[in-house]
Amino acid sequence: MSGAAADWRRFLTGRYAAFGTLAISDAIAVALAGDGLAIPLVATLGASPALATLIGLFPFVGGILQAFVPAILRRNRGDLRGLTIVIAAIGLMRPLLYIAVVVLIWAGLLSAIGGILLIAIGFGVGATAQALAGANVQTWFGRILPERERRFVAPRALAIQFGLGSVLLVPIAL
């Protein structure tokens, strides 16, 4: 077995398996709740390309909220794990919102414009939360792993997140 294959096997099993599982779950969450789904959905509901692009920028504006994380950590006695779980849970609620919006529009209980607005708000808040949770996870990697192990884990976790996330988005692109 080659060195690279042995390293991947070591990453996906044993001591590092939890990091691989975290990367896989994050890839699935981002693919099912990210802009690869939200932007085509608002476009299908009638949003102009300019509005869809603007909606896609919401998480970047929300990234400013990262500045509040240290103050929140001071308030909750440094519980980065608990904070990350809460923030990630907010981010992971987006698919449920998208389903609810589509069902409400289909049932005639919500207009397309109202649906676009709800998806835009949910996407902006949820994607920002997911980005904050991702940053916290990277911080967590840095705190619990020695530098050598972090350099082993982080690139593989990111490769899984981006690679699997891209594969999961192929059906949406078709």
Image (spheres, rainbow, N blue to C red):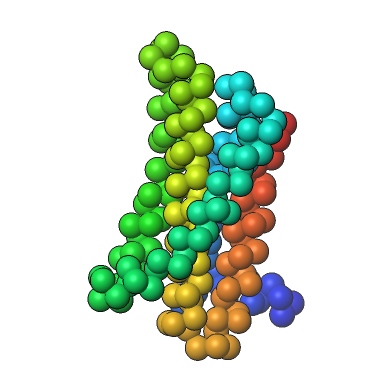
| Quadrant into which the N terminus falls | bottom right
The quadrant holding residue 73 is bottom left
Kindly identify the residue that appears in the image at 38 percent across and 49 percent down.
90
Kindly identify the residue that appears in the image at 38 percent across and 73 percent down.
70
**Residue 167 rendering spot, x and y as whole percentages:** 67, 47
| Quadrant into which the C terminus falls | top right
**Residue 172 rendering spot, x and y as whole percentages:** 65, 34
Q: Is residue 91 left or right of residue 3?
A: left
Q: Is residue 32 left or right of residue 47?
A: left
Q: Residue furthest top?
A: 108
- Residue closest to the eye, 59 or 162: 59
Q: How many marks?
A: 0
**Residue 170 rendering spot, x and y as whole percentages:** 69, 40
Above or below, comparing residue 71 to residue 101 in the picture? below
- Residue closest to the eye, 43 or 114: 114
Kindly identify the residue that appears in the image at 42 percent across and 34 percent down.
97
Q: Is residue 7 left or right of residue 81?
A: right
Q: Can residue 30 be seen by looking at this rendering?
A: no
The quadrant holding residue 136 is bottom left
Kindly identify the residue that appears in the image at 33 percent across and 57 percent down.
86
**Residue 142 rendering spot, x and y as whole percentages:** 49, 81
Above or below, comparing residue 24 to residue 46 in the picture? below
Above or below, comparing residue 83 to residue 110 in the picture? below
Q: Can residue 70 be seen by looking at this rendering?
A: yes
